[in-house]
Image (cartoon, rainbow, N blue to C red):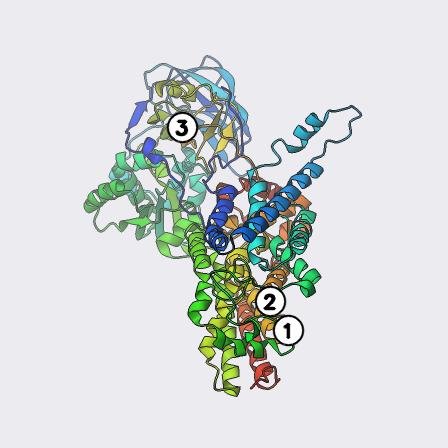
Amino acid sequence: MIVKTAKIKDTKNLVGRLPAIRFTEPKYIYLAMDNARCPKAELYIKEGDHVNECQVIGMRHGPFFEQPIHATCSGTFVGLEKHFHRNGKLTDFIKIENDFLDTLDSSVKTRTQEEIDALTKEDMTQILKDCASVGLGGSSFPTYIKFQTDKPINLILINGIECEPYITADHRIMLEYPYRIVNAIKYVMHAFKCPHAKICIKSKYKDIKEVYTQVLKEFEGSGIELCCVGNFYPQGWEVAMIKSATGIQLKPGELPTNRGILNLNVSTMVGLYKSIKYNMPVIKRDITITGDGIKYPKNFRVRVGTSVKELLEICGGYKHPEKDKVFILGGPMMGVSVPSDDVIITKTVTSVIVLDKTDYVENPCVRCGSCVLSCPVHLEPVQIMNAVKTLDKERIKKLEPLRCIECGLCTYTCTSKIQVTDYIRKAKMIAKL
Amino acid sequence: MTIIKESAPHIRSKASVTRMMVDVLIALAPTLIFAFVVYPLKMLAFYLLSLFIMIGSEFIYVGLRNMMPNDGKKHSFKERFIYAYKGKFRLENVLTAAITAVIYTLIMPAGAPIYAFVIGALAGIIFGKLVFGGLGSNIFNPAAVGMLFAKICFGGSYPPKYVDTWYFAQPDVSAGPSPLSGSADSSLVNFVNNMGEYSPLDMVLGRIPGTLGEVYKITIIVGLIYLLIRRSADYRIVLSYLGTFTVLALVGGLSIYALDKNVNPFMFTLYNLLSGGVLFGAVFMLTDPVTSPINPPSRYLYGMVAAVSTIFIRFFAALPEGVGFSILIANMVACVLDHYEWSSSKYTWKKFLAMGLLIVIPALVTFLAIYFGGVYNGK
């Protein structure tokens, strides 16, 4: 098929209509010591100590910023254990035994509407920094860094597109917490003195559209509106979203704040509401457990730090246990595959997808050009692949592989079933040398 | 059950090379079946022969390429055979050879002697494809290479391009050459002289002298529609080739009209489009993805280069046809268009300029050569 691939079979019907099951009382909670952005960490507590919910129990140190670690339940610190992190690495996790009392830390306090109205942008940045608020869409980019911009912001875009197939966590969160999302948008608009905000969703989600048409009636005159954008992949990529919502085409590498646009994910907004209203960090999030390899796919609302194994039991375990599986954290297009199911839900895990392993027979490239037509950043994946095969560094640099966003469309669309994206990753490494 | 780590993305589309190849075979089927009906026995013999040669060559090639390395031990023939072919000689190898065989059979003249046919087929598959590394690596269209090889080597000993059948019989042997057969006169003069011999309906139905398959325009158009619906051929190539060809043929027709008011320029254009292998070449040979450039703007340029060379060969060269050669020329240009210095899927003003120049300059050359250059000196 010599065709521009933009629509992917989204397979969201597996779980899209199911409510998010509350599973917030696991026996143990595991918190990662380090993550991709902060490779070092120190602990403030020792074994046997009692911790309160939302208490700061450690600090992650990264090259650009520091990030406090918050306990997501009250209980006793048991020790360190090794589990798989979202980035696919075996990492130390802080193990806390839950006492099911939910004793809140003294730092948690409710702010009144007057106090919130009095918050400036700087105050809000400080709150988000203390609450370790990060992008919950999967990037884990600290939200407060986005807030530190000096540029005037005149449009806030809320990303509720969730263009990856299979995942429905954002869909559920949008249906279940519309007031938190809209209130959080109001807080941010107030802090930035920004007149407009748009909630971007896929135009095929009629249910979300109905909910927000109702909810936004209460907030008339606030400048918040719903914006239905395209149904294609990768519509959720910020450059594609800004293009669809406003018509502005960002240059490669240009930050949206340069054009007066601030974009945030819907899950981040729910966390941000809690941070500003109650001074609480993100302790719960929505995730989707789905895929062909799961018996009963489900949506969950869980505490950050829950072990996936417990959730898999609620889902009835694996379907076809005799077949080999691929275990993916994140979406099937860009997600990370981990070599074991011993995985912990961190703040940025949006979904767990278990697929039956399919082996594809690779054919020689017939130069059909589908990857070139499909590439959202207008690269030529097949040319980059040929350059990598010949290790021609000059040619690789000229073809600009560093612009690649690794959306995976070139591999998805390849008629010869070649893993083109892998070649582009190699090209990126060579080009960086 | 084991959990296996793999790199993203983890899902794939259903599109496959096999499907594209089967689509091309299905699109070729109406033409092939019609040719079978018109020339029952000869066609069957030619077709089976070329199928045997092409698939056999591919089979031997795969075996030679994957020969078991010498590790000092003795292996039985069976072991060696399994080592060389298991998982390496697949459906794709058979299908690609079959497509080449069908196209080659359809573009060979019905009157070709059997030895010319065999040698052309061998040359096409070996020099056109296997020496470059088989599927996906060839620069030239193998069928065109084979057809031209046979034509150049044995052209002198060819009987006429056509043989009489129940569907079409040459009305009168002394009536003169076919619309596109060479003679001492300029080919353009010949062409115009022969336009009166056949009605446009005859041209569409294939009641004209020509090769085994390329004259049946209706079945070719059915194949084209199928390919475009299934997206197994790139419409850009067909569009730019036929578009540029039409424009340049019209310029040629108008230039002749300026000299000779008896020639209808629109009829001239239509006859040019319907004669020879223009339609067949555009639909089945130029669109071969392996030998065409990779990005969309280059594909437009590629079709235009092929159209310009077809027009120049037809109007000004001693060869009457020119589609085969123009396909090979365009295949060569495809490599240049794909060079990394300027290859990009973006449409830049330079590319639009190149497209414009590719129409304007050949049109100007055509007009000057016909009006002032005396290429058309008939009547």
In the displayed structure image, the side of residue B326 where residue A59 appears, left or right = left
- For disc 1, the marked residue is B317
Q: Nearer the viewer, residue B79 or A254?
A: B79
Residues packed near mark 2 inside 10 Å, few (<14), some (14 to 19) or many (20 plus) = many
Q: Position of residue A7 (x, y in %)?
A: 40, 45
Q: Position of residue A78 (x, y in %)?
A: 46, 14
**Callouts 1 and 2 in the same chain:** yes
Chain bearing mark 3: A
Q: Nearer the viewer, residue A194 or B222?
A: B222
Instruction: Name the residue located 37 percent from the left edge and 38 percent from the top edge.
Output: A10
Query: Residue B322 shows which numbered tag?
Result: 2
The answer to whether residue A276 is visible is no
| Distance Cα–Cα, label 3 vs label 1 | 63 Å
The quarter of the picture where residue A143 lies is top left
User: Tags 1 and 2 in contact by the CB under 8 Å rule?
Assistant: yes
Q: Quadrant of the C terminus of chain B?
A: bottom right
Dot 2 amino acid type: Gly
Mark 1 or 2, nearer chain start: 1
Q: Position of residue A358 (x, y in %)?
A: 49, 30
- For disc 3, the marked residue is A292
Dot 3 amino acid type: Asp
Numbered disc 3: secondary structure: loop
| Distance Cα–Cα, label 2 vs label 3 | 55 Å
Numbered disc 2: secondary structure: loop
Chain bearing mark 1: B
